Amino acid sequence: MPFELTLPFSAIVGQEQMKKALLLNAIDPAIGGVLIRGDRGTAKSSAVRALGRLLPDYEAVDQCPYRCDPAIPSRYCDECRRRANSGRLPVVRLPMRIVELPINASEDRLVGSIDIEAAVRAGTRRFQPGVLAEANRNLLYVDEVNLLDDHLVDVLLDAAAMGINVVEREGMSVTHPAHFILVGTMNPEEGELRPQLLDRFGLCVEVTTPPDIDQRLRVMELEREFLDNPQAVHRTAAPRELELYDRLQAATTRLDLVQLPDAIRALIARLCLDGSVAGHRADLVVARTARAICALRGAALVELADVLEALELALAHRRRDAAIDKPEQAQELASRAAEQLAQIQATTPTETAEAARGEATQQEGASGGESNEGWTTAEARESPSTEAVDVEPDTVIQLRTFAVKKLDLPRERQARRAAGKRTSTKSETKRGRYVRSSQNGKVTDVAFDATVRAAAPHQLRRRQATPDAPNQLQLESQDLRQKVRERKTGNLIVFVVDASASMDAEQRMQATKGAILSLLRHAYVRRDKVALVAFSGRNARVALRPTSSVDLAERRLERLNIGGTTPLTHGLMTALKLIKTERLRDPRVYPLLVLISDGRGNISLFGEEPLLEAQRTASQIKQEGIRAMVIDSTRDFSSQPGYPRNRVTSLYGAYAFNVCGDLAERLGGRYYGLFDLSQSAIVDSVQREMLRTGSA
Ligand SMILES: [Zn+2]
């Protein structure tokens, strides 16, 4: 991206937590990345790009696809190790890059795969590096990480935590360094990350529109200035950018010297153990973050304030109970922390040399038996020489806390795969997204790319065996690979509800709200989403955007009113537009439109203009291939095939034209008469509909 297209980092107004979290990860990528949550238009991605400009160039081994650091031989790739044996490695200076992972990336693209061209031409198995290789020593940016396939997020976070990428496929076994600054962004309204993935991000920050009116004005003013003359904005910001660049550099250099006193380390362990925190990495992340905060403010000894700030950044997304009153909770935590620190210091008045010697055993307990952190493995190996310089007998260096056994990584990854922990979401049909391939069993759905990759190394030999067809790709049955598909996105259930004032409007709305919350709480797949379009008054509005968040739905639905007349067509059109938008964003989404109405209101009963419009819209929805169903709150029977739906007797008057039944027919969906409309009746019929169309 050209220099002028995004704001300078130092010019970004507000969003202090986001900026801080980004800087801390730049100082110490081993913190484990940052997840930035926030609505659209909260400058998440411009902040990431702006950070890119503050990151320094680095020295790398020339011609190495992973840009190995010449100064750290322990992290060399195999090739650099080999080259290092036969003399000095050539060095180049490279700029730090922002490597972006597209959300439709395949596993091959992420981890790398066999180089097909080399395999076919020369019969050699050569590794074609993927995004994780490109990301080594750079910044890896995943926009909309919540829309990324869970399996890929898993692989990504594994690599981030271990600092290496392990690839075992097509007869290749490749391990290469993958140390990167990980930044993910997401809009929670578009679906949450699974909690197991959420707490594997080191830090997490929420960005919101600034509540302060002055700040909002400043943001707008700056945006205008930037649009008019981006160069001028960059010129004005240059001195501050330079100062920040220097500060960041100094902090990175200082990080190794920052000390974490015993008492502070004990405090962190205590605070993270008190039961309200999920995930076992919390104390490690808090300790690392506190050290980076200390380095950034230019100090050498971690203090209570650093720990408190670190807790805020590292614990919000690990807490099991959502914070109700954040400021009050922070206040409470601060005083509890101070109290505990005083207590710890009172029981160990002087941290003696004896205590320091007993360190090794003590620390195993303090770090909670943590032993699978590749990052720390690497650093632990290097730390003694660099750390020993500044050590006083009564302080303990944090890095040594994490000294761990060497891991047998490839085996661990394979074992996890074999366990097949996400079989439940694997799709048996040919629907769903192709996420990877397998070699097992009967092949019914050929993964061509994987098959070609498997066959590639054998081409030279096979061609020699059959000289009459020298230019053909020769496949044998053992090359065949099956596609493994996953239906990640799940359903999008769009309720279109008549909110016009009528006898049963209140009940209808209450039942619908209840049904929405119930469907969200019992979502079949994590990524099921529900949306609500309410029509009444002059038009229809989206009362709830597609979301999988129960909290959000509760908040939005609380303020939903009833009243007015009934423009049914608007309701259907609004729903159609919403579904089309959602499909653009995520083509895998599987929508179900649920119209809930009494079919009366101001809809003309005898085929005049408003009804024709509604009928046309219904046909259009069917043409778009959107599943639909209609729940009629004035009739009392379930859908029966062959029933003359459009001439059914209304409870409110004989011979009335059945608007709902007619629309159901045009929508190509089922018609349910639910006179006794209740939350469970809606949920039952929606679930029946989802099962009927085999959506799970
Ligand atoms: Zn290398």
Image (cartoon, rainbow, N blue to C red):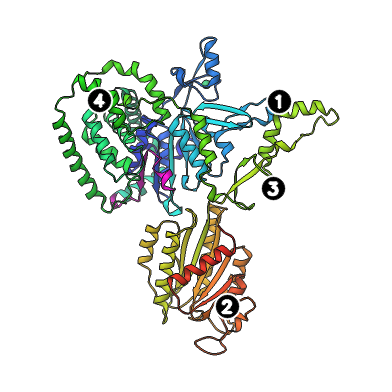
Q: Residues within 10 Å of mark 3 (few under 14, many from 20)?
A: few
Q: Which residue is mark 4?
A: 300
Give the number of the mark in front: 4 or 3: 3
Q: Quadrant of the C terminus?
A: bottom right
**Sequence-earlier tag: 1 or 4:** 1
Q: Which label number is shown at residue 44?
A: none
Q: How many numbered marks, from 0 up?
A: 4
Residue kind at label 2, given as amino acid type: Gly
**Sequence-earlier tag: 4 or 2:** 4
**Sequence-earlier tag: 1 or 3:** 1
The residue shown at (50%, 86%) is: 651
Residue kind at label 3, given as amino acid type: Thr
The kind of secondary structure element at disc 3 is loop
* Cα–Cα span, label 3 and label 2: 41 Å
* Range of magenta residues: 193-214
**Sequence-earlier tag: 4 or 3:** 4
Residue 353 in the image: above or below residue 321: above
Residue 667, image x, y percentages: 60, 70
The residue shown at (41%, 28%) is: 375
Residue 441, image x, y percentages: 66, 43
Quarter occupied by residue 19: top left
Q: Residue furthest bottom?
A: 654
Q: Are marks 3 and 2 in contact (CB under 8 Å)?
A: no
Q: Which residue is mark 2?
A: 661
The residue shown at (52%, 43%) is: 151
**Sequence-earlier tag: 3 or 2:** 3
Q: Which residue is mark 1?
A: 123
Q: Which label number is shown at residue 444?
A: 3
* Cα–Cα span, label 1 and label 3: 27 Å
Q: Residue furthest top?
A: 87
Q: Are marks 4 and 2 in contact (CB under 8 Å)?
A: no
* Cα–Cα span, label 1 and label 4: 56 Å
